[in-house]
Image: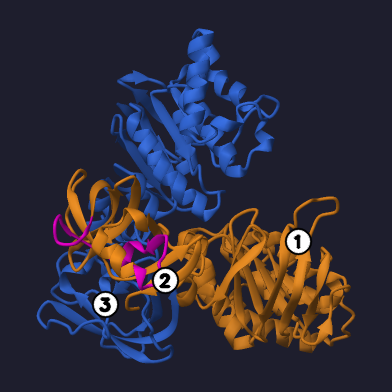
Amino acid sequence: MLRVDRVCLDGNEATAFDYSFAPGEMTVVLGGNLSGKTNLCRLLAGLPTRACGDVSYKEQPLTDLPPQQRSVAVVFQAFVNYPNWTVAQNIASPLIAQGLSREVQEQKIRSLAQTLGIGDFLDRNPEELSGGQQQRLAIARALAQQADVLVLDEPLVNLDYKLREALVLELKALLSETQATVIYTSSDPRDAFALGDQVLLLEKNRKLQAGTPLEVYQQPANLAAAHLMSDPGVNRLPLIKGDEAGDCRAVRPEHVRLGSEAAPSADTELDFEMQVDSVERSGDETFVHGRVNATERADVTEHWVVRRPGMHSVEERQVMTLHVRRDDILTLVVD
Amino acid sequence: MARIRLDGVGFTYLGADAATLAPLSMDISHGEAFSLLGASGAGKTTLLNLLSGILQPTRGRIYFDDVDVTGLPGRARHLAQVFQFPVLYQSMTVGENLAFPLTTRGLNRNPADIALRVKAVAEELNIEGILNRGANGISLFEKQLVAIGRALVRPDVSMVLLDEPLTAVEPSVKWRLRQTLKQAQRDLGVTMVYVTHDQTEALTFAERVAVLADGEILQTGSPEDVYQNPTHEFVGHFLGSPGMNFLPVAELPETLRHRLKHQGDPERLGFRPESAKLSAAGAFDLTGVVSSRRILGTQQGDVISMYGLQCGDHSVFVRSSASQVVGDPVSIDLRHWVGFRNGIRVGRHGAE
């Protein structure tokens, strides 16, 4: 099992945490800019970083080993391939070091290239490939290392939306076949659901929460964790008197229903009035933005977003009723 | 602000066999929010460069209002551009950056007028609080707002071209940036052309979307129209996440095939993951086997999933609150579909 102990992603001991990566599974490390994701990747790979702490694999310390002596393969956002080598030579580079026979090497090259959809380009140089193909090549090279640990640091962020969607599905299928412990960083909660067996939430170099995607989604540890695992972020409600322990309440945008959709069921739901500012429709979803007066004070409003499946026509600049199930309201601590 | 009109505009690189951009005509209204959506290599950048005057079309004419600008250089078209990464003068304050386009074009404005205009634009974008800060000391989100502010500050700007303006901004603030941009677009009545590969951005931003593929505009319409009623299989596939599912009609159950005969007699049937309903096997004619499941969240307390299904040799995705596991046989009820022949729409069925 891959472990980090007393890890400080910014070199500051106040943020130290421990974490064990589930063996053979994929952990999505979810965090925004400057959350410490890349520092964590560099620490695991043994590359220079401000992050410090102990890294071990199967109880063997890795901390003092140089990168080439660790069984850790890395793919970064800005993909790196050997520019003067062909696709085949690029994939072969880690195989040569493994001391495999020429035939076994060639067979592996072909099968990896095939799996990643670059089998027809073995004789080309990387610059003759599209961005998506270059990133697949970088992934093929990382897989060829047959490392115990595979680190993918936002590997798809530079690619086209539609290509990213296809590659996420491919990666999921491909990586479920390997025995490697996979770490995949992202700032998009959809990746956590699509790829993660486990998810580790980071903010400002701190560990916010860890668990399966559904656990983290249903029981966020705090307001920041709820926000991070929500796109757009959660809607705030003030705390009401007599509420259980917590500093605030919140509801996810997809858990708010429009008054036009269904009648409320009085005991299980709360009603709110929203002053609608704008409506966005993405095709499969409708987003209604507006201000909600969630307290008794008329001058305090919160900005809310309602996220509904399908196309809804909603007039802008009107007041509309919203329904929220009591069970969907999250009571959260702020830190 | 201007109305932008392209009349049979095409572009072929010197010596190239095929056109990079097939001759196309389009009409963007005065003050309209318009999106150009396409993958890399679809011709978005070529079209953008034709609009901004970096490239000259090899055929056709471009008009801003009724003025033929085809031969005019970019400077003379009075357009403003916003790029993926904000380009600011790092040594200047935010306020100085915003004022810059007003001071350099020999407009001979007096400082009080400039200050008023800068203040108005800053208020529109909610950045009036950082006017005195250095441009190098603000967040990426604020920098992009300042870049947008600089594009909007000249009252004589004919249109604003936005090239993937949200790509570099992280998801948690994308929403706010897009909101602010849309609000400003409406309040100031600016003609905006938004170029992106991201369907969500294109559809949420625009009143009309043009879908571009292989140097051709396949469909132009409202976000609802291009999403619900694609004219080409490619548009159906490209929009939506995942995109439209397609099944060959010849492999569908007889009862379904019979109905389709009277609905344009399509070769392939397209349907969206949310316009099908799953149930235990047996209830409907169309059947499949669950091959994958991805959780999307919860709704009314139930877990919502995107199921991958194997229907014969074909795989499709269906969004459902049903609770199935991999290997389960299921039955699929289609509520809305679009029929295609040779990749082009021939019929459609269903509410919505």
Q: What residue is at 16 percent from the left and 68 percent from the top?
A: A327
Q: Mark 2 points at which residue?
A: B264
How far, Cα to Cα, is label 2 from label 3?
37 Å
Do tag 1 and tag 2 residues touch (Cβ < 8 Å)?
A: no
Residue A228 placed where, x, y %?
A: 37, 57
Q: Mark 2 lies on which chain?
A: B
Q: Between residues A137 and B189, which one lies in front from this camera angle?
A: A137
Q: Name the residue under label 3.
A: A257
Do tag 2 and tag 3 residues touch (Cβ < 8 Å)?
A: no
Are callouts 1 and 3 both on one chain? no
Task: Identify by letter the chain in blue.
Answer: A
Quarter residue A60 falls in: top left
Residue A248 placed where, x, y %?
A: 26, 69
Describe residue A151's horizontal placement relative to residue A329 as left or right.
right
Q: What residue is at 52 percent from the left and 67 percent from the top?
A: B201
Residue B91 — which label? Answer: 1
Describe residue B239's horizontal placement relative to residue B186 as left or right.
left
Image quarter in which the N terminus of chain B is found: bottom right
| Numbered disc in front, either 1 or 2 | 2
Image quarter in which the C terminus of chain B is found: bottom left
Q: Which chain carries label 3?
A: A
Q: Is residue B317 above or below residue A236?
A: above
| Numbered disc in front, either 1 or 3 | 3
Q: What residue is at 34 percent from the left and 68 percent from the top?
A: B260
| Amino acid of disc 1 | Ser
Residue A46 in view, yes or no = no
Q: In this view, does A205 lie above or below B155?
A: above
Q: Between residues B256 and A63, which one lies in front from this camera angle?
A: B256
The magenta stretch is B261-286
Q: Between residues A127 and A246, which one lies in front from this camera angle?
A: A127
How far, Cα to Cα, is label 1 from label 2?
63 Å
Q: In this view, does B302 lie above or below B191?
A: above
